[in-house]
Amino acid sequence: MRAFFFARPQLTPTPARALPALARELGLAALVAKDESGRFGLNAFKLLGARFAIETLLAEGGLRRGATVVCASEGNHGRAVARASREAGCAARVYMAHDAAQARADAIAGEGAEVIRVDGSYDDAVRILQSDAAEIGWTIVSDTAWPGYERIPFLIMLGYTRMMDEVFAELRAESREPNAVFVQGGVGGLLCAIASWCAFHRPQCKVISVEPTDAACLQASARAGRPAAVTGPLNTTMAGLRNREVSPPAFASLLPNVDAFMAIDDAWAHDAMRALAHPAEGDARIAAGASGSAALGGLLALCRDESMRGVKQQLGLGPGSRVLAIVSEGVTDPALWSAVTTRR
């Protein structure tokens, strides 16, 4: 993976932005946000995995130019697959839940992909695309896995680890390496990538998963000790994390390497959106969506909610902590971002 990115110097790193004022307010030594809002010309981290996976398949002969690539998405992964497919000379079809935000669907279509709305959730879209791909012979590039389909999600997760290479290369030079990282949960791909990287390279670094209370499938699975689906309505505005089921191989790998599984209400993600959009003096400004702000929202909940004091102490977060929060996306739903951030 490192050879892939070293051979492509035009794929420049995203910045790690310091938030010293917010760190002081939260009682931390340092706080840095890994800003993925401009990754390779898109506004989310997903192109790291999609591009690495698709170009690896092309190089190996598992995908040919002119073929059709398919995936399911709430927005960011679909747009990344659409962009990577177009650049590889392939067509793309992206399956989306019926109620996915129109702005996200339009962004995917703008990359040249065909968008297919399904009558159901993201998890339903995954099952429908499997059937269509098997019937017609399309290549699935999914960031969630299922029995018999593990290698491509593994390649995608391997691409995501590039993010941590970038972070530690930048912060090591400034003696600001984090000792805790807050990361979005979702189906588990990004979380698995970051937790696995830390387990191998920085085992002392705590890893905290953050997901919506309405879609806390990772937390439910951690409690059960096995993949467990959640039920009920998915009303969260953290659209990129709006799924009922984990990716089983990702979950099996991340379970021993994640220190805490948090589930937060949308209000915390919205607080984080406002904190990034209207920073205190000296802090970087970042325009980020609800999913992109979720990791920081988890940190805010841990530091500001008195009921979380015991968890905070158990994780050892305090005046000596240097925290990294992944900001995984920029503004993918402009109407929501404007509505949330205009209220201070």
Image (spheres, rainbow, N blue to C red):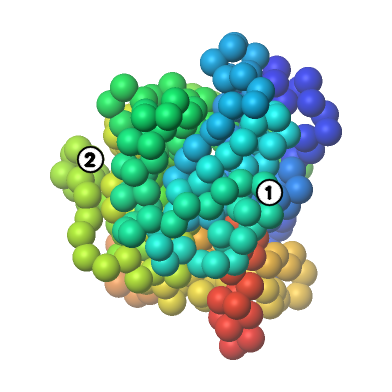
Image-based side of 85 in relation to 213, left or right? right
Q: Nearer the viewer, residue 72 or 277?
A: 72
Q: How many marks?
A: 2
Q: Quadrant of the N terminus?
A: top right
The tag earlier along the polypeptide, 1 or 2, is 1
Which residue type carries mark 1?
Glu
Residue at 64% over, 31% down: 90
Residue 258 sits above or below residue 156 on the image: below
Write down the quadrant of residue 133 in the picture: top left
For the residue labelled by badge 1, is the local secondary structure a helix, a strand or a loop? loop
For the residue labelled by badge 2, is the local secondary structure a helix, a strand or a loop? loop
Which residue type carries mark 2?
Pro
Q: Nearer the viewer, residue 154 or 285?
A: 154
Residue at numbered disc 2? 227
Write down the quadrant of residue 231 in the picture: bottom left
Res. 65 in view: yes
Residue at 63% over, 54% down: 109
Residue at 24% over, 44% down: 222
Residue at 35% over, 71% down: 235
Q: Which mark is residue 146?
A: none
Q: How far across and how far down the image is residue 199, in percent?
A: 45, 29
Q: CA distance from mark 1 to mark 2?
A: 34 Å
Q: How far across and how far down the image is residue 118, in percent?
A: 38, 55
Image-based side of 207 in relation to 7, left or right? left
Mark 1 packing: few (<14 Cα in 10 Å), some, or many (20+)? some
Q: How far across and how far down the image is residue 89, in percent?
A: 70, 30
Residue at numbered disc 1? 111
Residue 259 sits above or below residue 266 on the image: above
